[in-house]
Structure formats: structure tokens, C-alpha cells
């Protein structure tokens, strides 16, 4: 199961260099993510190992949350808007959204099960 790690990154690139080194040394693969306003968000499979390695290095992990991965064609105008409308209509609160390395939308939401149903997934996609 994939998780989003929200990680304090107060020093921008310097923080990401340290985060990347710590996670790399721990053998954690970053499957997507980025940095927004001094908070890094990274998609990982092994959230427990990632969080422990960061905490052991005195890097603040702000949250570890389950995600919903949704295939979405990047070349279809309006696809993102339609996806978001499905969440809105189902009353799902979206907190974070980005794209993983496989082109899927990574959704960090208040109710993953309701989000899965809202977007019509029969099961949560996993990495293959």
C-alpha cells in the first residue's frame, strides 16, 4: 500500500538533499512527489522504514497518510476537473494532489474508501 509522507523541509534544496540521502541510505524508493512551501510530499511503499529513517536523522515527519492512486490520461482536456468534481460530489476533502512516476494522480484525502468509490475504482491500484 502506498503512503504520502509529509516532511518538514525548511531549507528547500538543502532539506531535500538531506531527505533524499537519508531515504536513499535506508533503501526507500521515492515514487513521486515534490516540495511546496517548505513541506515535502513523497509517495513511498515502505512508509514505516521511511518515517523511522527520517526520525532517526532528526528530520520532522509531519504526517504519514494512505493515498488513493488514480490513473488519469494527461492528454485528455478536462480530465482533472472531472476527477475533482467526483470527489466534490462525494463530499471528499482533498488535502494534497500530485502525480507519481507512472503518471497516476496521487490523492491524499480525508476518506480514502469514499474517494475510491467516488472515482469508480474497484480496488486501489498498487505498483506492479
Image: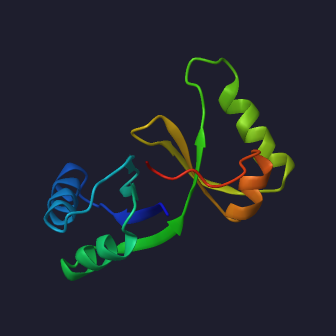
- Specify the farthest residue to the front: 128
Residue nearer the viewer, 104 or 63: 104
Count of numbered circles on the image: 0
Image spot of residue 71 (x, y percent): 59, 37
Residue nearer the viewer, 53 or 16: 53
Quarter holding residue 28: bottom left
The residue shown at (77%, 60%) is 114
- Specify the farthest residue to the right: 89
Q: How is the image coloured?
A: rainbow
Q: Is residue 73 above or below residue 15?
A: above
Q: Is residue 56 left or right of residue 41?
A: left
Image spot of residue 54 (x, y percent): 25, 73
Q: Is residue 8 left or right of residue 2?
A: left
The residue shown at (36%, 49%) is 31
Q: In this view, does 79 lie to the left or right of 38?
A: right
Q: Is residue 23 above or below residue 75?
A: below
Image spot of residue 74 (x, y percent): 55, 24
Quarter holding residue 119: top right
The residue shown at (80%, 47%) is 88
The residue shown at (72%, 63%) is 113
Quarter holding residue 47: bottom left
Q: Is residue 8 above or below residue 90?
A: below
Image spot of residue 73 (x, y percent): 59, 26
Q: In this view, does 94 lie to the left or right of 15?
A: right
Amino acid at each position: 500500500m502506498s503512503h504520502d509522507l509529509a516532511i518538514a523541509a525548511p531549507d528547500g534544496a538543502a532539506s531535500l538533499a538531506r531527505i533524499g540521502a537519508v531515504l536513499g541510505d535506508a533503501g526507500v524508493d521515492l515514487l513521486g512527489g515534490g516540495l511546496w512551501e517548505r513541506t515535502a510530499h513523497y509517495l513511498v511503499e515502505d512508509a514505516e522504514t521511511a518515517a523511522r529513517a527520517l526520525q532517526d536523522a532528526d528530520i520532522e515527519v509531519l504526517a504519514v497518510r494512505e493515498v488513493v492512486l488514480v490513473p488519469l490520461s494527461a492528454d485528455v482536456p478536462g480530465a482533472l476537473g472531472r476527477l475533482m468534481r467526483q470527489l466534490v460530489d462525494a463530499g471528499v476533502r482533498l488535502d494534497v494532489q500530485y502525480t507519481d512516476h507512472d503518471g497516476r494522480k496521487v490523492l491524499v484525502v480525508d476518506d480514502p474508501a469514499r474517494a475510491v468509490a467516488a472515482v469508480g475504482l474497484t480496488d486501489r491500484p498498487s505498483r506492479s
